[in-house]
Image: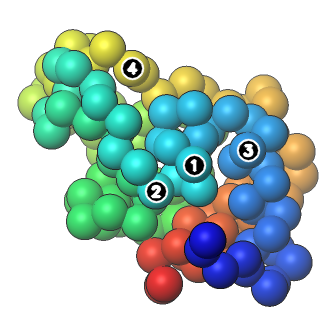
Amino acid sequence: DEPAPEDSLVLLGRDRVQELGCVGCHGEGGRFARPNPGSLKGYVPPWDGPDFPELVRDRREFDEWVERGVSRRFESNPLAQYFLKRAALKMPAYEKHLRPGDLDAMWAYVSWLRAD
């Protein structure tokens, strides 16, 4: 059993990624590399995995991925677009499903995972 976060913002983030269905692709707690045929590495990157810093450089890019389903950096990169279009699973845009404070809470949760 993994330790539970104690920080209330981190706990809210954990709850929201469950409620929004993020764990359907990123796995329980965002920690599993679910197969994703056609994608660059062949799996959905876990939030605590080694690929995360390449895909999400900072909080701004995290927000773009969550709100828009893609970062502006990847959107403007032809090679990234090639793999994003081929991937069986595509990151949905959650902008219309977010509540005020969700991005702060989700970023806090992912940061907590990565610090572990």
Disc 4 versus disc 1: nearer the observer: 1
Q: Position of residue 91 (x, y in %)?
A: 47, 28
Q: At x 29% / y 30%, what residue is drawn? A: 35
Residue assigned mark 4: 89
Establish if 105 lies above or below 28: below
Q: Earlier in the sequence, mark 4 or mark 3?
A: 3
Q: Position of residue 115 (x, y in %)?
A: 48, 85
The amino acid type of the residue labelled 2 equals: Arg
Query: Tag 4's secondary structure?
Result: loop
Gap in Å between the C-alphas at discs 4 and 3?
Answer: 18 Å
Answer whether residue 54 is visible to the viewer in this image.
Answer: yes
Residue assigned mark 2: 31
Residue 28's label in the rendered image is 1
Establish if 111 lies above or below 57: below
Residue assigned mark 3: 18
Disc 4 versus disc 3: nearer the observer: 3
Gap in Å between the C-alphas at discs 1 and 3?
Answer: 8 Å
Q: Are marks 2 and 1 in contact (CB under 8 Å)?
A: yes
Gap in Å between the C-alphas at discs 3 and 2?
Answer: 13 Å
Disc 1 versus disc 3: nearer the observer: 1
Which residue is situated farthest in the front direction here? 1
The amino acid type of the residue labelled 1 equals: Glu
74 left or right of 110 in image:
left
Q: Nearer the viewer, residue 70 or 109?
A: 109
The amino acid type of the residue labelled 3 equals: Gln
Q: Earlier in the sequence, mark 3 or mark 2?
A: 3
Q: At x 80% / y 84%, what residue is drawn? A: 7
How packed mark 2 is, by other alpha carbons closer than 10 Å (few <14, some 14-19, many 20 or more), is some
Q: At x 73% / y 79%, what residue is drawn? A: 5
